[in-house]
């Protein structure tokens, strides 16, 4: 992966993972800095500049290391869901990605104070000993795409092996399985793949692996003994949606099998207002905006409710037709 400038926080310079990350990179130049936010957060860099220039920061995450996930974020409505923050930004360029309006820079940030994140997880478990608790990776960066560089997964494997009543979900579009091949499957770790129709992925998932490549990666993980999840999110309207969704449900059923999938989420495309404005500026000709969006009760920009329900109910019916048990399906953040 090409890196123009590698920035290393002085406070992170002597962390064990920092040297491991540096060994994986060949940046054009390296700079040591006091605070990554002086470069990453306090100067505005256009999102699409990532196409021509890519910088990477190695830093310590300060402030919130865990955050309570929104309602209907994960499987199990009665469970407690957190997402943890291991990195910022993504190597892919999906047109609907909310990161383009969330951060002021598209540069990559890898945090190396995972010991502190794990302490926060341990504290969260202690506060709710009688509740099933999930920790999700992949909210601000793909959980696998750079895992061979960031190399933190073995640390989390040790934690979840020692805490078998908690659950880890790795959310990804990546087919980079190099780190997982060296880790034993755990019954409380789920690798979940974001899927869509092939035509939607071809139109909007720039730089990401194709949908069939992701399904092949799921097959390999299934054969290795890993537990799997699927997120059909975001669903984007097309007149031929029913036909195209059926075409992707079939290989999931035939090549993976719903018996090997713990859960499937369905979510219709949505944007925070700032992200919606940024996405329209970045991709003015995108077919993603062919349908009208309105501001919902949660202040997010969405399709009108009847269309959302039609897409959700249609996709649910197709999955059930292909043999998916209804109890494995949930509507995400709807």
Image: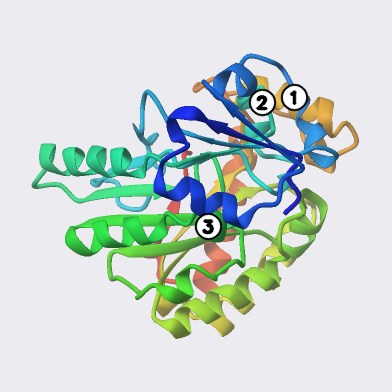
> How many badges with numbers are in the image?
3
- Confirm or deny contact between disc 1 and disc 3 (CB under 8 A): no
| Viewer-side label of 2, 3 | 3
Residue at mark 2 to residue at mark 1: CA–CA distance? 6 Å
Q: How busy is the neighbourhood of tag 1: few (under 14 within 10 Å), some, or many (20 plus)?
A: many
Residue marked by disc 1 = 278
Which residue is found at the position 18% from the left and 58% from the top?
163
In depth, the one of 141 and 75 nearer the eye is 141
Residue 224 location (% of width, % of height): 44, 83
In depth, the one of 138 and 269 nearer the eye is 138
Q: Secondary structure at mark 3?
A: helix
Q: How busy is the neighbourhood of tag 3: few (under 14 within 10 Å), some, or many (20 plus)?
A: some
Residue marked by disc 2 = 101
Height in image: 5 above or below 79?
Answer: above
- The quadrant where residue 126 appears: top left
Q: Secondary structure at mark 2?
A: helix
Which residue is found at the position 42% from the left and 77% from the top?
260
- The quadrant where residue 217 appears: bottom right
Which residue is found at the position 41% from the left and 58% from the top?
153
Q: Mark 1 or mark 2, which is nearer the start of the sequence?
A: 2
Residue marked by disc 3 = 147
Residue 144 location (% of width, % of height): 54, 58
Which residue is found at the position 69% from the left and 15% from the top?
43
* Left or right, 62 with reference to 277: left
In depth, the one of 252 and 154 nearer the eye is 154
Q: How busy is the neighbourhood of tag 2: few (under 14 within 10 Å), some, or many (20 plus)?
A: many
In depth, the one of 28 and 93 nearer the eye is 28
């Amino acid at each position: 992966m090409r890196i123009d400038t590698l920035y290393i926080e002085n406070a992170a310079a002597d962390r064990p993972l920092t040297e491991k990350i540096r060994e994986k990179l060949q940046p054009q130049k390296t700079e040591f800095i006091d605070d990554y936010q002086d470069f990453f957060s306090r100067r505005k860099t256009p999102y699409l500049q990532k196409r021509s220039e890519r910088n990477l920061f190695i830093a310590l995450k300060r402030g919130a290391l865990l955050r309570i996930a929104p309602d209907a974020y994960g499987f199990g409505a009665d469970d407690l869901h957190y997402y943890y923050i291991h990195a910022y930004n993504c190597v892919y360029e999906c047109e609907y990605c909310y990161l383009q309006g969330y951060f002021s820079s598209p540069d990559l940030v890898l945090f190396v104070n995972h010991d502190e994140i794990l302490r926060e997880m341990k504290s969260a478990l202690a506060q709710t000993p009688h509740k099933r608790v999930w920790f999700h990776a992949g909210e601000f960066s793909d959980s696998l795409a750079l895992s061979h560089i960031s190399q933190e997964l073995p640390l989390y494997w040790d934690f979840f092996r020692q805490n078998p009543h908690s659950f880890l979900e790795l959310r990804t579009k990546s087919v980079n399985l190099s780190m997982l091949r060296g880790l034993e499957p755990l019954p409380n770790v789920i690798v979940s793949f974001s899927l869509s129709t092939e035509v939607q992925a071809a139109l909007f998932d720039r730089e990401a692996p194709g949908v069939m490549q992701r399904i092949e990666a799921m097959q390999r993980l299934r054969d290795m003994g890993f537990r799997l999840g699927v997120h059909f999110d975001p669903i984007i309207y097309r007149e031929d949606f029913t036909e195209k969704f059926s075409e992707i449900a079939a290989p999931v059923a035939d090549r993976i099998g719903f018996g090997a999938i713990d859960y499937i989420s369905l979510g219709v495309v949505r944007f925070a207002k700032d992200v919606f404005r940024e996405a329209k500026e970045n991709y003015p000709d995108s077919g993603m905006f062919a349908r009208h969006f309105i501001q919902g009760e949660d202040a997010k920009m969405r399709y009108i409710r009847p269309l959302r329900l039609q897409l959700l109910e249609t996709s649910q019916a197709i999955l059930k037709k292909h043999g998916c048990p209804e109890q494995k399906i949930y509507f995400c953040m709807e």
